Amino acid sequence: MAVNPQDVTGLLLAWSNGDGTALDRLIPLVHDELHRMAHRHMSGERQGHTLQTSALVNEVYLRLVDSGRVHWKNRAHFFAISAAVMRRILVDFARARNYQKRGGKAVHLALDQAPEISQERTADLVALDEALIRLAAIDQRKSKIVELRFFGGLSVKETAEVLKISPDTVMRDWKLAKVWLLRELSRK
């Protein structure tokens, strides 16, 4: 079933305005896309960890609902925020896992029931996050484009809509950001 972006936007606006039933109607419309976003990130993990994707989606829902009122603009804005939340969850989980490996007493995340993320992927995710933070210090927009495209899975058009720039600018910045990140990550 194809989801009409206007339906999602309407429900997001209603939810922003305090309509609690809008959230109940919204979740089935965005669940598949959030699941695809999570699956993209979890697909590089060890075989047989099907609960990871669902746990990640559930944690995104919890953080979005618990974050208080967000004044949603549209579907693309929702997925952009979801991408940022997903990035934060994955990086926090990876850092907590590395901290525990060094003998620390890390704070447990809601994902602690999910199977462990592999060590190599964890290191890559933390390194990417650190590189994105460095990129944001130099060029916030390029960092945001990477977050939206990589973590959020947004299309060039959707990314342009969220950032209020042209699709050509998104593509140019996306290419430059990938080259910059590749150089940064190869230094490690």
Image: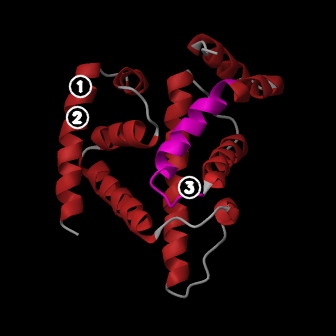
Q: Quadrant of the N terminus?
A: top right
Q: Residue 127: give x, y in percent of width and height.
A: 34, 63
Q: Is residue 156 above or below residue 7?
A: below
Q: Secondary structure at mark 3?
A: helix
Camera-side residue of 44 and 133? 44
Magenta segment includes 159? no
Reading the image, the residue beneath label 3 is: 89
For residue 173, the mark is 2
Magenta segment includes 31? yes
Where residue 110 sits, quadrant-wise, is bottom right
Q: N-terminal of the two: label 3 or label 1?
A: 3
Q: Secondary structure at mark 2?
A: helix
For residue 169, the mark is 1
Q: Residues within 10 Å of mark 3 (few under 14, many from 20)?
A: some
Residue that extends furthest to the front in the rendered view of this protein = 47
Q: Which residues are magenta?
A: 29-48
Residue 173 placement, left or right of 81: left
Residue at 51% across, 61% down = 46
Camera-side residue of 159 and 35? 35
Q: Are marks 3 and 1 in contact (CB under 8 Å)?
A: no
